[in-house]
Image (cartoon, rainbow, N blue to C red):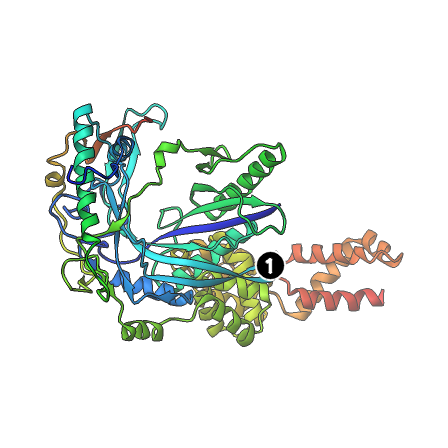
Amino acid sequence: MDVVIGLEVHAQLLTRSKMFCGCATTFGAAPNSQTCPVCQGMPGSLPVVNRRAVEFGIRTALAFNCRVNEACRFARKHYYYPDMPKNFQISQYEEPLAEDGALEIDVDGASRTIGIQRLHLEEDVGKLVHEGTLETAQASLVDFNRSGVPLMETVSRPDLRSPEEAAAYLRAFRAVLVYLGVCDGNMEEGSLRCDANVSLRPRGSSELGTKVEIKNMNSFKNVQRALEFEVRRQAEALEAGLRLVQETRLWDAERGYTRSMRSKEFAHDYRYFPEPDLVPLRIDRAWVDAIRAGLPELPRQRRQRFLRQYGLPAYDAELLTHSQALADYFEAATGELPQAKLVSNWIMSELLRVLPADDEAAIRAAKITPRHLAGLLKLIEDGTISGKIAKDVFQKMVVSGEEARAIVAREGLTQLADEPALAAVIDQVIARNPKAIEDFRKGKTAAAKALVGQIMKATQGKANPAIVNRLLEEKLSKI
Amino acid sequence: MPDAERPPMISREDVLHVARLARLELSEPELEKMREQLNSILTYIDRLKELDVTGVEPTSHAVPMVNVMRDDVVVPCFPRDEMLANAPDRVGEFFRVPRIIED
């Protein structure tokens, strides 16, 4: 069977004010403190389009090589749910902002182009909090702060062929949005949300199977897990000769399965019609050209540059450029210390051990700044400390935000490179370990390693390993 | 009905469907009244179709105006208590609504 997946991504745009009114969009404000008659949908209130939201939409459309439609208008999408008191959402239906683009993704070293069908703007809705659990709740509480926050919906073509590709698409998509500065990409806070359409069809067939929509996947990991589950569920049903129904299913992350949403919860009968309270938009070519001219370097371009300019392996370049903050971090550190691969290794193995790669804010706020990291690596390069000691120092820098030099000086971690002093230590260790020497004579080269360990121990790990190895080899060869 | 010759365009079932989507409960006489009114509206729309609109640009708006936009500037929101004042039910800072049940 072929897997056919299409993704719909909703992204909250980083505007200061809402889509159709001047209320603030600050996340986490006290409930219902950021509302007005427009975003609460009171009769008689009138929406006015936020120009910045349209600009962000165009910016994104251009990054995905979409055609920006000159004629564009808003429509009312009707449905009844208490998260939206006016009983329709202002969205776009016919004449969306942009259509027909593409996003390149990489899975297992192979590149694939995923079509983007359309990109449109709409308003977010309020947030429901259930009293008690969902099953026992007698009432729901509504917070309208989110109502009216600008949302950009981007619909991919059903070009994705596996849950891994879907996750790769979402990662690449998110990276572009963050680079463009139009969305913070935070899936946990819901500023980036993803629904998927999944179906199976006989291998090679061009006909689409029965499609199931999956909602409520609020992290990259959950998108992949939910899709893996759903593909398996559909395959098992089809193998057993069952018919699938077209439906919407909710991903339950805790229990690890998708469950059917009651069909009437989502009647797909939205009765769209043009929003009479908003006049159409006529997107000026000059505006589009100006936005195009201001596009920043995008993740793929930056990755290519990292390969070229720093000679990094493809894996490093890919990982570093997925996050704008991480790529910035790398470039700032490399500016201080040009050993790009060394910097990259430390970012990937040490920095990402303490910071999540997709948390832009945490990376930008890291106590160990790019300059601090470069300072630490310089100490390894000039032989002041060993790589092993540097890892300990790194851990301290992460917590305290101090410079490596200060920690090394205070804790006396400077590497022992004094040859006569080291030679004396080595002689003592040799004298104390006749058994190891005997083993070495009999051809057990591993015995030399044990001696190195002893020497390092005797110097609290501060002995310069290169010098120790050389001196020890000289001495052993004379025995 | 103005055009008694034609079969009704909107059936009883159509009215029930639309009423359900709009969460309206209609009595039997209301249902029939809605059906008649909706049919007469559609008949009127049909009459408009008789107009020759060749060369007339379709529009979704009565006013020939485009690109009414505002700058992305935050203005003070309404006081929460004022916004909550008309709520039929509230709990603290929240609106309280009945639990959504299946019908």
Q: Position of residue A88 (x, y in %)?
A: 24, 44
Quadrant showing the C terminus of chain A: bottom right
Total number of numbered discs in the rendering: 1
Q: Which residue is mark 1?
A: A388
Report whether residue A206 is seen: yes
Q: Nearer the viewer, residue A104 or B57?
A: B57
Q: Position of residue A67 (x, y in %)?
A: 38, 67
Report whether residue A396 is seen: no
Q: Nearer the viewer, residue A279 or A60?
A: A279
Q: Nearer the viewer, residue A176 or A165?
A: A165
Query: Is A371 on the left-hand or right-hand side of B34?
Result: right
Residue positioned 83% across, 67% down in the render = A477
Quadrant showing the N terminus of chain A: top right
Query: Is A454 on the left-hand or right-hand side of A381?
Result: right
Q: Nearer the viewer, residue A387 or B74?
A: B74
Label 1 Cα crowd, 10 Å radius (few <14 / some 14-19 / many 20+): few
Q: Position of residue B46 (x, y in %)?
A: 21, 48
Residue placed furthest toward the front: B5
Which quadrant of the view contains residue A15? bottom left
> Chain under label 1?
A
In the image, residue A345 above or below residue A190: below
Disc 1 marks which amino acid?
Lys
**What element does badge 1 sit on?**
helix
In the image, residue A276 above or below residue B7: below
Residue placed furthest toward the right: A442
